[in-house]
Image: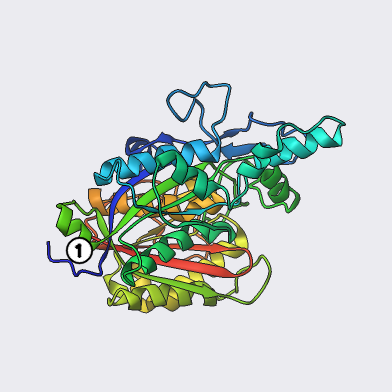
Amino acid sequence: MTTAPDDVLVTGYGVLTAHGFGEEALRTGVFAGRPAFRPVERFDTGPFRGRHAAVPATAPLSGVGPDRTPGQRETLVACARAALDMAGLAGHPRVDVLVGTQGDHREVTAFWSARQHGADGGVEERVTESLPAALPGLVASDLRVTGRRLAFVNACVASANALIHGARLIRSGRADTVLCAGAYLVEREFFAKFDSGRAFATDGRVRPFSADRTGLLLGDGVAALVLEAGSRVRARGGEPLARIGGWGIASDAYHVCQPHPEGQGLSTAMTTAIQHAGVAPEDIGYVNAHGTGTKINDSAETAALHRTFGTAARTLPVSSTKSTTGHMLEGSGAVEAVIGLYALRHGILPPTAGYTAADPACDLDWIPNEPRTAGVRRVLTANAAFGGVNTAIVLERP
């Protein structure tokens, strides 16, 4: 290996989406362009306009019955164990745990619903354990690791921020092994909020960047990635999967829930990440876009890509994998980083599923409907969130 001591290397990951658990589920789902949207049955959707989300058809984890949805703690631990096993670090005691999450709202909803109807609301400890600040500690305890335990709660960039903060800890010499994760599982409270905002696609399908797109749909998404200092990986004879070459964070400061129409904040984040990686825009071989499938987001993101990549944008392959996974909220950044890793390792770019018609406001190469073989050297993954926060991460072959 020729990596520098302060390189930030990815050495393992675990991932769960509505397609299932692990890398094979990504291959047959996301990379095959197969949407995972179906009617939601884990709670009553009768009061809502929307009915669909990307949720698994069968039990997503071994040992969990089909009549029970595992919680964020269980799924985070499963992904973290898979990541540590892949990295060859099972049983390693000193690992920082950074998690992007808004907490497991199923317990909170059940508690207050019971109180509203005169019941005792169940065990309050279960509510406390479901809060964002508690989850990193619980995951670390289940894994029997010590180290920092931090929660990131800034909506749809939460787990991307966990990854960026983990990379900063390593680059600055404050840590050598960091587990960065993110989680969202479709539940009633956030489903109701997006439904009341009329954000959901009206026909149960997500078509990012397509002229006939009608909105987003939510989806289950959990992932964990092991980041290590290059010096540590070399010392223990580890095998790096990718290098985190650069990252960027920026704010639109424009609107509470709408992006800047010209994508200024997202463009700043992407430009910063590319510059931080020490490469030129044309050195990026693929972009995994935020791509929610809403009219406003997709046109603003297209503008941001033009601002960032200039003339190189015309031939740059871009796709939105939310067309198959749905919007995984706090889990998006971590899951989509794993998707970027898969693209790097296997030389295949995931498509934008459901694409039907070109939109003049979205005039880029969206890899429509079918995967594409391409041996790229670097990928960029971008995320944005309410409040105008934006992130971008550049992943490179080691």
Q: Residue at x 26, y 57 (%)?
A: 242
Instruction: Say if 302 sits above or below 227 in the image.
Output: below
Vertical relation: 278 (above or below) 35: below
Q: Residue furthest left?
A: 1
Amino acid type at circle 1 is Ser
Looking at the image, residue 203 lies above or below residue 158: above
Q: Secondary structure at mark 1?
A: helix
Q: Position of residue 363 (x, y in %)?
A: 46, 66
Q: Can residue 324 be seen in this snapshot?
A: no
Q: Give the residue displayed 30% in from the left and 41% down from the top.
A: 91
Quadrant position of the C terminus in the picture: bottom left
The residue where tag 1 is placed is: 231
User: Residue 270: image x %, image y %?
Assistant: 42, 72
Bin the neighbour count of mark 1 within 10 Å (Cα to Cα): few under 14, some 14-19, many 20 and up: some
**What's the image's color scheme?**
rainbow
- Is residue 253 toward the left or the right of residue 304 in the image? right
The residue shown at (59%, 46%) is 217
Is 287 on the left-hand or right-hand side of 377?
A: right
Location of residue 229 (image quadrant): bottom left
Asked whether 276 or 199 is in front, the reply is 276
Q: How many marks?
A: 1
**Residue 380 shows in this picture:** yes
Q: Nearer the viewer, residue 48 or 84?
A: 84
The answer to which quarter of the image holds residue 365 is bottom left
Q: Position of residue 255 (x, y in %)?
A: 67, 72
* Image quarter hosting the N terminus: bottom left
Q: Position of residue 167 (x, y in %)?
A: 36, 65
Residue at figure coordinates x 58%, y 53% from the top left: 133
